[in-house]
């Protein structure tokens, strides 16, 4: 197993945490004091049909929510299977550099969805399609709004579906510490997969924008803390 050691005092970690803190404040302010969520869902909601036309479309439901989602999920299962098999019967062809990073990605594929879904269990916020503005029965609430007494719990925040792709950001570890700029691009690309999946769900009326953005924020925090605790991975000098 990868030996863990905490290194939370590096400049890179401090900058990353500062970026997360700033982004959290911005999302809180924008989500609470603007109508961005409603503007986006209003665009995708057909007032005449009283429905979200993209809900059962081939692109949104069959392709993105079906095929693409399943491909990514099965890719995660494959990583877990490879890591489990290598743990039981180590492959000589797998170098320590690759082995430690595969285990890191496998852990992220489990932790990111688990933590986001755990947060969802305590969330009262509802999905667009259950909000009264879009034909549902529940009021629209922002993250810091007072919850009306007797309101049903929505369990729709943050966006769980986006985590299908958000864990891919952990692939950045294959370029650390030797190519941090490439790692940053890979990290952003991985988050983008989750954000795209989340946007499709917004088209279907399944989530608001800030549901997806907060899921991406949580995924970033989880992976960042994993990188900090798995400090020896970042300091291997050679790919052996």
Image (cartoon, rainbow, N blue to C red):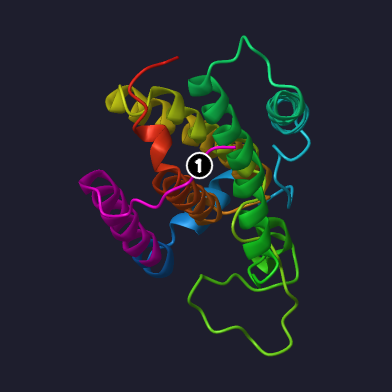
Is 88 on the left-hand or right-hand side of 114?
A: right
> Which residue is painted at 58% across and 41% down in the image?
108
> Which residue is painted at 44% across and 51% down in the image?
225
Q: Is residue 13 magenta?
A: yes
Residue 202, percent from left and from top: 60, 45
Residue that lies at the very extreme toward the bottom in this rendered image: 149
Q: Which quadrant is home to the N terminus?
A: top right
> Which residue is painted at 52% across and 22% down in the image?
96
**Residue 228, placed above or below residue 170:** below
Which stretch is magenta? 1-28
**Residue 170, placed above or below residue 74:** below
Residue 144, percent from left and from top: 48, 76
Task: Kindly report the secondary structure that dominates the magenta region of the rendered protein.
Answer: helix
Residue 71 in view here: no
Which residue is identified by label 1? 3
Report the front residue among 35 and 70: 70
Residue 205 in view here: yes
Residue that lies at the very extreme toward the left in this rendered image: 11
Q: Is residue 175 magenta?
A: no
Q: How many marks?
A: 1
> Which residue is painted at 30% across and 22% down in the image?
179
Report the front residue among 17 and 92: 92
Figure quadrant of residue 128: bottom right
**Residue 122, placed above or below residue 62:** below
**Residue 146, placed above or below residue 63:** below
Residue 76, percent from left and from top: 69, 30
How many residues crowd around disc 1 within 10 Å: few (fewer than 14), some, or many (20 or more)?
Answer: few
Q: Which quadrant is home to the C terminus?
A: top left
Q: Determine the secondary structure under disc 1.
A: loop
Residue 65, percent from left and from top: 73, 34
């Amino acid at each position: 197993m990868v030996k863990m050691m905490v290194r939370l005092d590096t400049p890179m970690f401090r900058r990353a945490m500062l970026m997360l803190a700033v982004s959290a404040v911005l999302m809180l302010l924008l989500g609470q004091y603007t109508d961005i969520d409603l503007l986006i869902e209003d665009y995708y909601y057909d007032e005449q049909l009283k429905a979200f036309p993209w809900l059962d479309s081939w692109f949104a439901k069959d392709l993105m929510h079906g095929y693409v989602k399943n491909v990514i999920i099965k890719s995660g299962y494959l990583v877990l299977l490879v890591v489990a098999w290598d743990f039981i019967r180590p492959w000589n062809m797998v170098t320590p550099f690759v082995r430690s990073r595969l285990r890191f990605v496998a852990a992220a594929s489990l932790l990111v969805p688990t933590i986001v879904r755990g947060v969802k269990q305590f969330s009262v916020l509802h999905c667009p399609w259950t909000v009264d503005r879009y034909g549902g029965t529940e009021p629209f609430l922002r993250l810091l709004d007072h919850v009306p007494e007797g309101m049903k719990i929505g369990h729709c925040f943050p966006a769980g579906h986006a985590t299908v792709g958000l864990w891919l950001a952990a692939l950045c570890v294959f370029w650390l510490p030797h190519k941090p700029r490439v790692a940053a691009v890979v990290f952003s690309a991985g988050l983008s997969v989750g954000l795209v999946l989340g946007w499709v769900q917004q088209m279907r009326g399944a989530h608001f924008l800030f549901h997806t953005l907060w899921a991406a924020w949580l995924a970033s925090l989880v992976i960042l803390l994993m990188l900090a605790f798995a400090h020896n991975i970042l300091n291997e000098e050679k790919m052996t």
